[in-house]
Image (cartoon, rainbow, N blue to C red):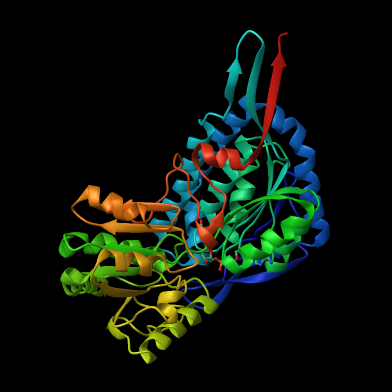
Amino acid sequence: MSTTTKGFHMTIGGALAPTEQTFGVIDPATGAVFAEAPTCTPAQLDAAMDAAKGAFPAWSRDEAARRAALEACADAIEANTEALARTLTMEQGKPLAKAEGEAKGAAHWFREVARMEIPHDVLRDDESARVEVRRRPLGVVGSIVPWNFPVFLAGVKTAPALLMGNTVVLKPSPFTPLATLELGEMLQAVLPPGVFNVVSGGDDLGAAITHHPAVRMLCFTGSVATGKKVAAAAAPDLKRFVLELGGNDPAIVLEDADPEAIAEKLFWSAFGNTGQVCIAAKRVYAHESVYHPLVEAMAEVARRVRVGPGIEPETQLGPLNNAPQFQRVDELVEDAKRAGAKVVTGGEPLGRPGYFYPPTILTDVAEGVRLVDEEQFGPALPVMPFRDVDEALERANATHFGLMGSVWTQDLDRGAEVAARLEVGTARVNRHGGVDPRVPFGGAKWSGIGYQFGRWGLETYSELQVIELNRT
Ligand code: NAD
């Protein structure tokens, strides 16, 4: 893809901010810079925070206006899905159809959230007193997003924060700032100035947001290592925070599962978005009686999949997003090979420009090897046999991560029993990935703190207030 001359702008206080300095954004399908994004100056970050703080009082007072504005955000995104998707594919690498799905997902989230009930409980209402629990917004929310689903994650963080009456300053990843900048620009037509600000820059800008005195809450999605820095930065000012961090999700295939029937679904649970999904299946434990047929059936799918530039219509898996991630996946696979792993499919880079790595299935690998113990966040999947389910659960749970897990079986009752023993925020039977605006989502252990989505997510973006009326 060639260099674009299109200008991308930050949105601060309802207007496009002047760009003084820029940084290059790389097309992962070529490895070459194709566009420039603005670098937010310290003064511009202050201006974004002032704008968000200034917009807060009026915005937080009018719930009906907020609901209408969120519906209008959904309409605006839907009307611009194609343009957003094109930019997203260019900077992130994913197939165009998936990029369109991502933009539509963000619109869907705005619409669903616009119609959600704000939590409000009456604990007591009798002749002597009425006690209610209400929810108050926090103020300015600083949101920091990674590069795997930039537009979707911007949507899922922003919609509930706004519904609850907060205002937002959002920073996308330096690897994928462009579609989010476009999102910021397009939503100004339907939101009051200062309610939603988008700034771009490097990791240092993220750190500056976490330390900024105007911010009352930090909403972070990214790696465990950065999440710990965010929590530490929040502490001195007691900023509230929610952390959605990495995972190393286990999928446990029981002896009664039909390998042929589940292979395709399990494959896409692991390799969708080229494995760059927090809730991808990252370790498969298969009962020894179904292990070999399952490996073969998944390998069949891997061999059929079209890997290529996201912009080509027949592509099913795009490149990895960036050079460090590409090198990391290569390094983890090489390390596993040195430890004796057998490569069933893939196993080395495609040897063309860009960050292309094919779907790689490995066997003869176990705990103690980095590919199993760490989050690979890419298209390399270890598939390991087990003899009894207690052993599988022990191995699945022997990790600091605890995001999602799945159990694959024809016996739903047994599946539910095994799933409940997984030390994860979400445990599923016969399905792995995917999220729902009505269902809470969060990580156990090092995979996160706090919850998003549904009533629980709205509570996250607010603080509780008790209102007590005494009649006597
Ligand atoms: P990352 O932690 O490197 O970066 C995430 C964001 O944090 C980027 O915008 C980055 O610029 C910013 N940042 C970097 N240093 C910072 C600092 N000191 N203070 C504040 N912000 C800082 O993560 P990544 O490589 O972009 O994303 C991949 C990770 O995200 C994976 O671990 C993946 O599992 C995780 N993830 C989790 C979820 C979830 O919902 N649990 C969803 C998507 C991705």
Asked if residue 381 is positioned above or below residue 405 in the image, the reply reads below
Q: Residue furthest bottom?
A: 338
Examine the rendering and report whether any part of residue 431 can be seen. no
At horizontal 58% and vertical 22% (from top left) the residue drawn is 123
- Residue 270, quarter of picture: bottom left
At horizontal 20% and vertical 72% (from top left) the residue drawn is 288
- Residue 59, quarter of picture: top right
Q: Residue furthest right?
A: 43
Quarter holding ligand 1: bottom right
Give how far across and how far down residue 253 sits, in percent.
25, 63
Most foreground residue, 163 or 382: 382
Asked if residue 72 is positioned above or below residue 404 in the image, the reply reads above
Q: Is residue 17 left or right of residue 158?
A: right
Q: Is residue 381 left or right of residue 201?
A: left
Q: Is residue 232 left or right of residue 433?
A: right
Most foreground residue, 351 or 203: 203
Task: Give the quarter of the figure containing the C terminus.
Answer: top right
At horizontal 50% and vertical 67% (from top left) the residue drawn is 400
Most foreground residue, 123 or 434: 123
At horizontal 75% and vertical 54% (from top left) the residue drawn is 17
- Residue 40, quarter of picture: bottom right
Asked if residue 246 is positioned above or below residue 431 in the image, the reply reads below
Give how far across and how far down residue 84 sits, in percent.
51, 53
Give how far across and how far down residue 161 sits, in percent.
62, 41
Give how far across and how far down residue 115 sits, in percent.
50, 30
Examine the rendering and report whether any part of residue 341 can be seen. yes
